[in-house]
Amino acid sequence: MLTRIAVVVPAHDEEQLLPACLDALREAARHAPLPVDVLVVLDSCRDDTAKIATDAGVDTLAVTARNVGAARAAGAAAMLTGARGSRTPGTRADAAQADGAWLACTDADTRVGPDWFSQQIRLAEAGADVVTGIVVVDDWSDWPDNTASAFRDAYRKGVRNGQHGHVHGANLGLTGTAYHRAGGFRPVPVGEDQALVRAATDAGLRVVRSTEVRVVTSARPRARAPEGFSAYLHAL
């Protein structure tokens, strides 16, 4: 039985976009069916990202990986094992925490919708171990005129009858138990989200790919993660 929602947000120098991300999470938490805790993983930040997170009242964890997979893994470990607190990880209480947790993952340049948590928990209660959602871009001003239509055309090919074939770390959720069974996030600079979902599928877990779970993400030309979403847009 799920008892809480644990949110992990990796961030590298995100002082400009993190406030909107946290505001959106705060609004979604107001509509959530379970208590929500948010952790911002500060990966080699040199700006005011830490201060923004602290001022917003969310927990932070500092790492120096410069690697989104490692940052997500560190955040997930902290949220699922109680490593942020004073207890020793690996106790029975920690296992219970993981069993009762829904781990929700997004990015610092992303804004979730007000129903983001409620949609994921609805699917979880219907039997989903893993939920993958889709992304929407609302600002194409930094790109050539044809980029938006090229993205929509390419993205639409993976969407059919309310299901899709996309995987985004900016819009991903799963039970703590499923996370451990799938082996967790790999410490890789790109593709950690897809690797986790593939491992979950290989482990026989139920993966639901819903178009109803949506987030708005940035389309900045200069990416934080190499070969990530920005690189995909450049290729288009």
Image: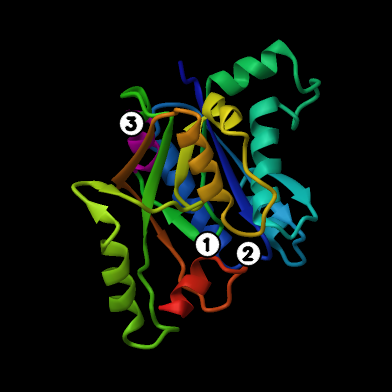
Give the label on residue 14, or none.
2
Can you tell which of label 1 and label 3 is closer to the viewer? 3
Give x and y (percent) for residue 5: 51, 31
Specify the amino acid type for callout 3.
Answer: Leu
Give x and y (percent) for residue 55: 66, 51
Q: Are marks 1 and 3 in contact (CB under 8 Å)?
A: no
Residue at the spot 51% in from the left edge and 55% down from the top edge: 21
Cα separation, mark 1 vs mark 3, equals: 25 Å
Residue at the spot 61% in from the left edge and 20% down from the top edge: 97
Tell me where residue 90 sits by quadrant: top right
Q: Nearer the viewer, residue 178 or 213?
A: 178
Can you tell which of label 2 and label 3 is closer to the viewer? 3
Q: Residues within 10 Å of mark 3 (few under 14, many from 20)?
A: some
Span shown in magenta: 115-122
* Residue at the disc numbered 3: 123
Q: Is residue 119 magenta?
A: yes
Cα separation, mark 2 vs mark 3, equals: 31 Å
Q: Is residue 54 magenta?
A: no
Give x and y (percent) for residue 199: 53, 38
Specify the amino acid type for callout 1.
Answer: Asp
* Residue at the disc numbered 1: 109
Give x and y (percent) for residue 92: 70, 11
Q: Are marks 1 and 2 in contact (CB under 8 Å)?
A: yes
